[in-house]
């Protein structure tokens, strides 16, 4: 097994992790600040992918479709917050789970009514359809490299916003002690709507980048949501840094497990047994990891500071 | 005296009404498929085809008033079993039909036949139900899982292709498909890779595939998994380098989303919209007219399922209690199947032809084209394990 192959698989893991991070960042902010369990976050990912695909069809421009999709998902997120979620903040988590699960069903059926049940055709934009020669013998798809760069840029931007700006200060304060922030005269309602909208736009960004490599179809966000929940449990709920570390760890463990577990097992327990055990174990790895983190550090790797 | 007469009249009326109800007893068919989530499009193809079959029968299956109750299994075995129970106990259906996924079928079929109700599978063909677990009340209008990959294995063996890389999702049908392929393909296998059912990203597997440098790739990725795999395979630049052979991966449910990324792909299949026979051409033409898209084999075999039920009810003249008579009639496969004439083997699985197809550029979009017949009247590999005697 060559080092180049390991390196390429690490890039794949990083790319998957970055995708998870875009979802996890919004989800963890919403949970940390508003104490809201939002299962419908995967639906915003799906909505982002649909908007981008539709806009690409209308305009033929990838850049325009990205801009349109981001703004539209932001708007959808804000509307959902104002219409449906605002009343849920004071309710317990079970009510929130039920209500946001209802939203999943609503969004899945809504996109099926507008765009049909058949998956939509999308493709990687021409300019990014090639490969980059990273090292001699290591070619990497340009589009996936762009996903990694965009994800890391978003992580950096979020870090700067949260730790260096007034909005970030309010967000951190809101996460520590909501009542006090409200008492100091901050419009907490508006703050919540903004945070939720930004979280939605991040999910939409994940979705619109996922469209060309995955499938744009009703229910596309449901599977990734489960992995994102694993990410924020591992990373620590409410923490952006935790979301980033958790996402990269989950992306790496999942990808490297899928790639190398079976070959490694076949040297110890034989190829036939490895064929059965390898894939089963690889698909469980991230959940085993989550269980391990929960038993040793129940608050996650980087829990948000609490007042 | 008067009240007594009144009671007698009422009793007479009630008796008459009972007879009336008996004569017009409708047939109830529970149709289970996946209607929500990523695989919902397959369920749509099946449901639309059932509706077309009902249209062609004048909305009367076997000459009786018909009610078809559609239920969604969400691609989950436990949900499938639950809705089957509901159809049997609450709706008291006379037939259960449908089922896309083999793992769901393995949970549903024994439930239905165990309750003494007839089951007509219209997609999944797990090997258990063709062999040891075969049942008098269970028929399928599709195939046994292994048969289609057997055809592809034979074709690749005949072409003397070697160094083949095999990939499939890790569930009941995935294992059946690879077993079927290996039954006829005797060349060298580079590796056999199983992925998670419903997996979205195949980049890690494709990277490993490229590193292994095989001469050909054989995959089974139905529905949304196929869309993702084909796009990512093409994006990795492998489409022009390593020929891709598949079963249940490139079809009319996935082609609209895959487009040119499928060009040049080989598939094996028992039916395709370009199959030349009267029943098939009528089905395809009327389907396109009514629903505005091209049907798939998922639909064709669901259409056949309703026609099979129709033939059974006609044979017993609407007496739905006569299950023995209906089983005997269904064994004759006496209806105009979209695949042309076929017969049932002793395990109630079809003996049918299998074809090699290729994805080519059609008039406006990519379409599948039959290249040649690989097997004629092909039997599945498990019927000898089935203890059923006719």
Image: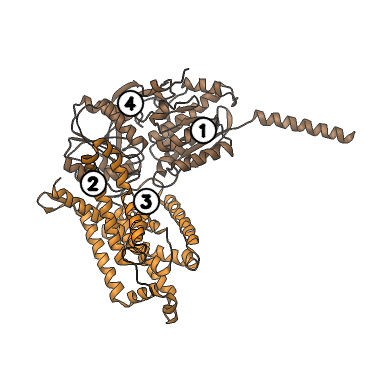
**Residue, disc 1:** B112
Asked if residue B226 lies left or right of residue B136, the reply is: left
**Between disc 3 and disc 2, whose residue precedes?**
3
**Foreground of the two, B207 or B56:** B207
Depicted B66 relative to depicted B78: above or below: above
Q: Which mark is residue A208?
A: none
Say whether mark 1 and mark 4 are on the same chain.
yes
Question: Disc 3 or disc 2, which is closer to the eye?
Answer: 2
Foreground label between 4 and 2: 2
Q: Closer to the N terminus: mark 4 or mark 1? A: 1
Q: Which residue is mark 2?
A: A259
Q: Given contact means CB atoms under 8 Å apart, are the residues at marks 3 and 1 in contact?
A: no
Give the Cα separation between the discs numbered 4 and 2.
34 Å
Q: Which residue is mark 3?
A: A223
What colour has chain A?
orange
Instruction: State which mark lies toward you, 4 or 1.
Output: 1
Among the 4 quarters of the image, the one containing residue B229: top left
Chain letter for mark 4, please.
B
**Contact flag, marks 4 and 2 (Cβ < 8 Å):** no
Relative height, residue A172 to residue B98 (above, below) = below
Q: Nearer the viewer, mark 4 or mark 3?
A: 3
Left or right: residue A76 compared with residue A246: right
**Placement of B116 over or under A228, stated as above or below:** above
Residue where numbered disc 4 is placed = B354
């Amino acid at each position: 097994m060559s080092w180049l192959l390991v390196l390429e698989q690490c890039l794949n893991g990083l790319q998957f992790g970055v995708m998870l991070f875009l979802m996890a960042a919004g989800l963890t902010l919403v949970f940390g600040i508003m104490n809201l369990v939002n299962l419908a976050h995967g639906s915003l990912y799906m909505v982002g992918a649909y908007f981008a695909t539709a806009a690409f069809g209308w305009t033929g421009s990838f850049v325009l479709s990205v801009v349109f999709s981001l703004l539209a998902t932001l708007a959808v997120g804000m509307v959902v917050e104002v219409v449906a979620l605002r009343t849920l903040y004071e309710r317990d988590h079970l009510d929130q789970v039920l209500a946001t699960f209802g939203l999943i069903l609503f969004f899945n059926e809504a996109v099926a009514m507008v765009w049909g049940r058949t998956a939509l055709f999308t493709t990687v934009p021409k300019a990014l359809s090639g490969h980059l020669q990273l090292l001699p013998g290591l070619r990497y798809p340009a589009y996936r490299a762009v996903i990694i760069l965009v994800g890391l840029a978003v992580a950096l931007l979020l870090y700067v916003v949260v730790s260096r700006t007034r909005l970030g200060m309010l967000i951190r304060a809101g996460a520590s002690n909501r009542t006090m922030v409200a008492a100091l005269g901050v419009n907490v309602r508006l703050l919540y709507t903004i945070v939720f909208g930004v979280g939605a736009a991040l999910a939409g960004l994940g979705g619109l980048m996922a469209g060309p490599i995955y499938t744009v179809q009703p229910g596309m966000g449901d599977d990734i949501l489960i992995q994102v929940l694993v990410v924020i449990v591992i990373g620590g709920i409410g923490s952006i840094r935790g979301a980033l570390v958790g996402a990269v760890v989950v992306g790496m463990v999942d990808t490297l497990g899928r790639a190398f577990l079976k070959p490694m097992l076949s040297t110890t327990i034989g190829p036939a047994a490895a064929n059965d055990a390898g894939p089963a174990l690889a698909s469980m790895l991230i959940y085993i990891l989550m269980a391990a983190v929960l038993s040793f550090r129940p608050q996650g790797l980087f829990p948000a500071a609490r007042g | 005296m008067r009240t007594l007469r009144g009671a007698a009249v009422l009793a007479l009326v009630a008796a008459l009404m009972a007879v009336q109800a008996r004569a017009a007893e409708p047939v109830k068919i529970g149709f289970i498929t996946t209607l929500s989530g990523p695989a919902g499009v397959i369920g749509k193809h099946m449901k639309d085809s059932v509706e077309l079959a009902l249209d062609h029968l004048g909305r009367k299956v076997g000459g009786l008033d018909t009610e078809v109750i559609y239920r969604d299994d969400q691609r989950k075995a436990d949900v499938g079993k639950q809705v089957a129970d509901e159809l049997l106990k609450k709706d008291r259906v006379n037939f259960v039909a449908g089922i896309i996924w083999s793992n769901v079928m393995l949970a549903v079929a024994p439930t239905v036949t165990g309750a003494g109700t007839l089951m007509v599978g219209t997609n999944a063909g797990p090997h258990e139900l063709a062999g040891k677990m075969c049942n008098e009340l269970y028929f399928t209008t599709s195939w046994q899982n292994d048969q289609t990959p057997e055809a592809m294995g034979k074709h690749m063996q005949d072409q003397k292709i070697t160094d083949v890389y095999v990939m499939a999702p890790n569930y009941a049908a995935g294992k059946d498909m690879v077993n079927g392929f290996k039954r006829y393909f005797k060349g060298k296998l580079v590796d056999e890779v199983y992925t998670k059912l419903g997996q979205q990203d195949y980049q890690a597997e494709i990277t490993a595939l490229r590193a292994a440098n095989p001469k050909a790739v054989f995959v089974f990725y139905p529905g949304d998994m196929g869309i993702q795999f084909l796009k990512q395979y093409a994006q990795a630049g492998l489409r022009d380098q390593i020929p891709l052979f598949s079963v249940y991966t490139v079809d009319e449910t996935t082609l609209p989303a895959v487009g040119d990324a499928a060009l040049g792909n080989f598939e094996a299949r028992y039916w395709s919209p370009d199959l030349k026979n009267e029943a098939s051409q009528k089905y395809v033409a009327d389907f396109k007219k009514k629903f505005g898209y091209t049907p798939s084999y998922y639909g064709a075999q669901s259409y056949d399922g309703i026609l099979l039920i129709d033939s059974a009810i006609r044979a017993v003249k609407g007496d739905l209690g006569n299950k023995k008579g209906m089983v005997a009639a269904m064994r004759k496969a006496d209806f105009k199947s979209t695949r042309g004439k076929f017969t049932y083997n002793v395990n109630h699985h079809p003996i049918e032809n299998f074809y090699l197809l290729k994805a080519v550029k059609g008039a406006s979009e990519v379409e599948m084209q039959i290249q040649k017949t690989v097997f004629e009247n092909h039997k599945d590999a498990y019927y000898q394990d089935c203890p059923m005697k006719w």
